[in-house]
Amino acid sequence: MRRPSMKELAQRLGVDRSTISRALSQDKAHLVAPETREKVRRMAIDAGYRPDLTAASLRRGRSQTIGVLVADLENETFINVIRTLIASLNVDGVPVTTPLIAETRDKPNAASRLIETFLSRRVDAIISLASTEADERALEDASREVPVILAIRTLAALNLPSALCDDREGGAMVARHLVERGHKFVCQIQGPPLATTFKLRAQGFSKICADLGVREVTKPIYTAEATPTAGKKALDQVFECEERPTAIFAHNDAIAIGVIEALRERGLRVPEDMAVAGFNDTRLAKVLSTPLTTVAYPIREVGEHAALLFHSLIAGEKDKAGSRTFMPELIVRRSA
Amino acid sequence: MRRPSMKELAQRLGVDRSTISRALSQDKAHLVAPETREKVRRMAIDAGYRPDLTAASLRRGRSQTIGVLVADLENETFINVIRTLIASLNVDGVPVTTPLIAETRDKPNAASRLIETFLSRRVDAIISLASTEADERALEDASREVPVILAIRTLAALNLPSALCDDREGGAMVARHLVERGHKFVCQIQGPPLATTFKLRAQGFSKICADLGVREVTKPIYTAEATPTAGKKALDQVFECEERPTAIFAHNDAIAIGVIEALRERGLRVPEDMAVAGFNDTRLAKVLSTPLTTVAYPIREVGEHAALLFHSLIAGEKDKAGSRTFMPELIVRRSA
DNA sequence: AATGCCTTGTCAATCGATTGCAATATCAAT
DNA sequence: ATTGATATTGCAATCGATTGACAAGGCATT
């Protein structure tokens, strides 16, 4: 006992399919007599009618679908941005645009392949929370067919509408704070160099250090991944230096957590023997027994602006679709 | 300069659209002369042809799409199961089935609304990693229209094909271990009672305690969410008891981490003053300076079996689609 | 030469909804 | 009664691909 199509509903009711379509639609419902409209709606409900969105997509040329590229599904910040984005895709609690979420894990060709799939599925827009310079070309090509929006990670060369955090200023905030606390020799543990985020944080941090006459460990220290494990390993490099810094700026809370654990294993106290600051203000940051000094990411703002960009671009209002950069906020806790 | 459709390719090449379709397909390509086939493929490539999957879906009655319901996108275990599932959706590295991932956050009506969307989009199957008794009805209804697969969380009443972990035995493993270590009075901090997972872990644990004559804190302790913050708060309840247990089984690593941090703040050492065990073997479990004794979730097995179920059911091989329960593994580290 | 088979390709219907245009009905105004 | 405007509905094309039925041509067999 399959569910009926519009055609069948029409037959049962003795009207044309177009009437059914209009009666059930949002914007064309006024074209059908209130009486008929009600009749159609009632019948649709108790016949268990369910619209076929693939058919509607084909005809409309709009799939009511958005492709979401995300670098890492385990990353709280990404997920939370996606959550606020998704929330804005609903109208009256009913999801009208379905997100197609796909993860790149920063693998070289992942993005281009996924973008191909998105385009084949005729997404109405693509929003990338995973941009790296390796995908620049793929995103540029895609942007000629469909609106492409950048979030979290920018790509300077592309000039696409984007929703970002001021990562440079975030790095600067940490630097200023460490200087205020009297640190004279500090160190960064950077995230993987692929994404612009970390580069900017590093720049902002270093700039302030230079300006205020604070020395940094000269050799740059990177992690392969932005994870606790990688952070833990990276700490070894800090201790290979001739002189030990008194504070570490980890580019992300996950890294910071690894660093703190590693310090603890070496019997060093945080912040007394070594101050540690992170970035993102993860859930865990508050819970740690040495609560983490970190930079709160403007999650809601970024998510909401990304959504706004999506809606403007869909509506063809290119003028309204400006890029914005939101300010993060330094959260001072015990660790630094 | 829009991309061409099959029709346009056909015109340019002076053949019928059906020939193009067959030449480009996997399974019907042999119906086209090798010469023509090559000609078509070459032309398709340099004309930048890209198939329209919404059109194909409509005609085929199969959308090459799978609806994935997940309770929490921040949960590593869910994500990792989804990852292995997704990996199996690719053929030769090319994604043929697109997952539609949606998060319920265990909110009452989220699942049914999302299932509606899935069905409107004509997904080929639904796989739920978010089942709670509240969604039982919705999943049952859905299963009459499309294959529904359960993963991680089961629903006893429904008898749907599922890929599970033996949570009861997992709980039992922890209990046996604590007994071996000489604990006589222990305590559980359970996850939210919605999902069967936690109920089973509790049962398995309590059964062994009872059998081996170990006492448990009588009042059951639940967390509102399976998060570190909730775990931290739950620990207060443990200390409200007249007699203090010597070991805690937290139903999940996130909870365990919160518990450990809270203990540390009270100045108690883990495991000397209080042993703590978790569940899932999260990334963080290894990294903690008191590495966590926990139960490794059979992520790969569950993910792969879920994928296998999907493929069998799609192929109409219902007989091959049996439920399976995989054994977790106790990982003994320092915390208990 | 007749028959049958195989290969290759065309024709046309179809999936289920949406929408521009035309048709009819209704009503008011002249 | 005629005209015009408005409201409501129907007709039919369309979105882009897939597929069953069928035709044409080539080849081998008898």
Image: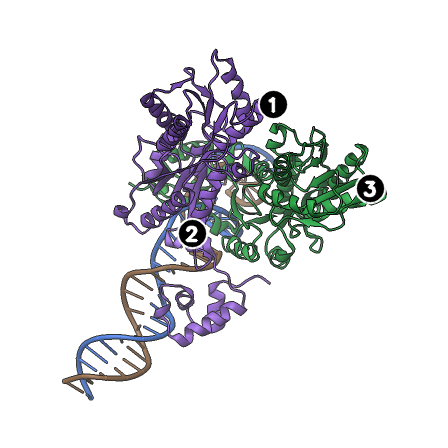
Chain colours: A purple, B green, C brown, D blue
- The reply to whether residue B108 is in sight is yes
Query: In the image, is A39 to the left or to the right of B264?
Result: left
Query: In the image, is A218 to the left or to the right of A74?
Result: left
- The reply to whether residue B31 is in sight is no
Q: Which mark is residue A265?
A: 1
Kindly identify which chain the residue marked by label 1 belongs to.
Answer: A
Q: Which residue is mark 3?
A: B214
Graded by Cα atoms within 10 Å as few (under 14), some (14 to 19) or many (20 or more), the crowding at tag 1 reads few
Task: Return the x and y of residue B174 as percentages of the image width and height.
Answer: 75, 37
Q: Which residue is mark 2?
A: A89
Q: Nearer the viewer, residue A260 or B333?
A: A260
Q: Residue at the location (32% across, 31% down)?
A: A156
Same chain for mark 3 and mark 1? The answer is no
Task: Return the x and y of residue B249 as percentages of the image width and height.
Answer: 71, 40
The kind of secondary structure element at disc 3 is: loop
Same chain for mark 2 and mark 3? The answer is no
* CB atoms of marks 2 and 3 within 8 Å: no
Graded by Cα atoms within 10 Å as few (under 14), some (14 to 19) or many (20 or more), the crowding at tag 2 reads many
* CB atoms of marks 3 and 1 within 8 Å: no
Q: What amino acid is found at the position of numbered circle 2 in the picture?
A: Leu
Graded by Cα atoms within 10 Å as few (under 14), some (14 to 19) or many (20 or more), the crowding at tag 3 reads some
State the separation of the CA atoms marked 3 and 1: 34 Å
Q: Nearer the viewer, residue A287 or A121?
A: A287
Q: Quadrant of the N terminus of chain B?
A: top left
Q: What amino acid is found at the position of numbered circle 3 in the picture?
A: Val
Kindly identify which chain the residue marked by label 3 belongs to.
Answer: B
Same chain for mark 2 and mark 1? The answer is yes
Q: Mark 2 or 1 closer to N-term? A: 2
Q: Which mark is residue A180?
A: none
State the separation of the CA atoms marked 2 and 1: 46 Å
The kind of secondary structure element at disc 2 is: loop
